[in-house]
Amino acid sequence: MRMSKLYMPTLREVPSEAELPSHKLLLRAGMIRKLVSGVYSYLPLGYRVIRKIEQIVREEMDAIDSQEMLLSAIQPSELWKETGRWDDFGPEMFRLYDRNNREFCLGPTHEEIFTDIIRNEVKSYKQLPLSLYQIQTKYRDEKRPRFGLMRCREFIMKDAYTFDKDVEGMEKAYYIMWKAYEKVFDRCELKYKVVEGDSGAMGGSDSHEFIAFSEMGESDICYCDACDYAATFEKADCKYEVKNSQGDVLNKEKVHTPDVKTIEHLVEFFNTKAHSFVKTLLYKAKDEVIAVMIPGDRELNETKLCHAVGVNEHELEMATEDIVKEVTGANVGFAGPIGLKKDIKIFVDSRIEKMKNIIVGANETDYHYKNVNYGVDFSGEIVDDLLMVRKGDKCPKCDSKLNQERGNEVGNIFQLGTKYSDGLNATFLDENGKERKIYMGSHGIGVSRTLAAIIEQYHDENGIIWPLSVAPYHVLVTVVNTKNEKQVELGEKLYKELLDKGIEVMIDDRMERAGVKFKDAELIGIPYRITVGKKADDNIVEFVERKTLEKKEINADDVLKTLSNVLIK
Ligand code: ATP
Ligand code: MG
């Protein structure tokens, strides 16, 4: 590629809206441009990287006999209604109507459509197992589109679906996919961890997420150094030891606590520890107001609450001040389980059952109760675990300490069981002629997010440092001074030689100052550079590695040999 012809609108300034290095660098390197919030165009260099990642994914999917197809992005609502997800998916779904007022959506994912395709054709156990995939644009009207390609409203995903006769088959397919994902992310040279995930809107039982490390990542994961336990914070079981389980049950007592609303204030006021309190939080779950009780020294895990209540995440929100006042009869900060003005469901973290003589809000402004006990003064629906795990907590598997890391979810694998084949009635006849439901798996890789995740791990203050496997080009020949005939001649000769050898090479033949060329070269991150400058007369060029910025003078005749050593791995 000739840079004089390449559309690569690089920017010197850091765009103000960009927070993440990947977002800034993709914009600066002229690889993407924003159309509207969460919707981007891929420019030539950016799109080359997308295609490289897609190709890696494709090769690894093909290697496990998953077969590529391409489905429509437009999906009729009827199929989603069959599985109940038309409502469950909520506001993240882009919905539209045709001229006859028929309802459609732009596919946020394709479980329904893939299941529909096979339910009409797969009839016998002989046609199973089956693994199908596509690489396609997905649409999700995210609540907070941000971080460039990390969280978009339009993004590229590889989604694979596996169809099996039974649980064992589904588990085997899951494991095969897991191994293929490791190959994909290893080839992208990502540093990542596989963690237990929450199944969320997909339903089903088991799921794992592939989290690429990044200090500014959106996913919080915890892991144990001593054993192999690793999970997202949403999913992680919290081991919480009750510290106030001893002593006699005392009589409850109302205490005047003027303007003492927060746990910090309460700790000071009562001169005790945060674990002596229980927080009562009010939420709106679908159309119902509920109360949730958790130990005062911990945070609520809303995902766990959603599971306990049986609502989707978008159906849960904190109660407004007005609702709190209506339900408790008091200002915010004094909610408790005793004497609520409305008969609402109370979800109680199981640890509270064991806590003795706790302090709670009295549902009266400026008052709390002390010496309150579960089963004596109040009751509710006990939920095993509603707490957010914390760094330093005990590992649920081996009791060692849990560590914390941040990262971005680049892929995930789900065991769906028969959720979709139940909803869409996808069955087959087994060896005995008996009709049975198909067991499914659903496995995604965020192709465009992977691109951003790679940059998060491979950059410096001057630009991107592409791993060879996904670099838009492998080699950049820079002609320092395009007015110098000798330099042009040697640069062009090398460029042609490399092209002839099938090497992915660019030549910077632009009429630009040397400084501009070097800055752009570092910004766009081509792994190896051949700089043809003043010593062209002596047939000497400079060989530069982007990663280390190490420079080495070599004879122009040795360029091919030097490159062969680093390009062939
Ligand atoms: P997240 O928790 O980040 O919202 P998800 O669980 O909704 O992800 P899936 O529905 O499983 O994601 O999608 C599969 C993959 O697609 C994810 O692992 C991620 O890499 C990618 N992905 C999901 N949402 C987005 C998005 N808004 N923008 C870019 N990539 C995304
Ligand atoms: Mg999501």
Image (tube, helix red, strand yellow):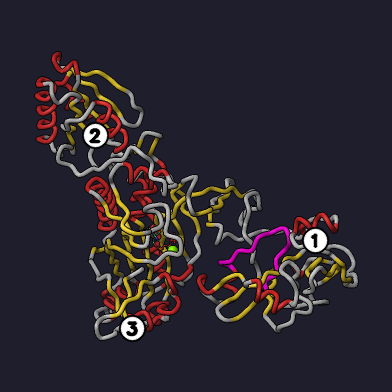
- Badge 3: residue crowd in 10 Å (few <14, some 14–19, many ≥20): some
Distance from Cα at disc 3 to Cα at disc 1 = 52 Å
What kind of element bears circle 3?
A: helix
Q: Nearer the viewer, mark 2 or mark 1?
A: 1
**For residue 220, side relative to residue 451 (left or right):** right
Q: Amino acid at mark 2?
A: Leu
Q: Quadrant of the N terminus?
A: top left
- The answer to whether 247 is drawn above or below residue 464 in the figure is below
Question: Counting residues from the N terminus, which is met first, the one under dot 3 or under dot 1?
Answer: 3
**For residue 356, side relative to residue 420 (left or right):** right
Q: Which mark is residue 78?
A: 3
**For residue 57, side relative to residue 383 (left or right):** left
Residue beneath disc 1:
276
Q: Are marks 3 and 1 in contact (CB under 8 Å)?
A: no
In the figure, residue 535 lies in which quadrant?
top left
- Badge 1: residue crowd in 10 Å (few <14, some 14–19, many ≥20): many
Q: Position of residue 251 (x, y in %)?
A: 90, 72
- Is any part of residue 176 visible from this angle? no
Distance from Cα at disc 3 to Cα at disc 2 = 51 Å
Magenta run includes residue 176: no
The residue at the point 63 percent across, 53 percent down is 390
Q: Quadrant of the C terminus?
A: top left
Q: Please provide the residue range marked out in magenta.
A: 291-304
Q: Amino acid at mark 1?
A: Ser
- Is any part of residue 119 visible from this angle? yes
What kind of element bears circle 1?
A: helix
Question: Counting residues from the N terminus, which is met first, the one under dot 2 or under dot 1?
Answer: 1
**For residue 251, side relative to residue 237 (left or right):** right
Q: Position of residue 429 (x, y in %)?
A: 31, 83
Q: Which mark is residue 567?
A: 2
In the figure, residue 377 lies in which quadrant?
bottom right
Identify which residue, 280 or 347, lies in the foreground.
Answer: 280
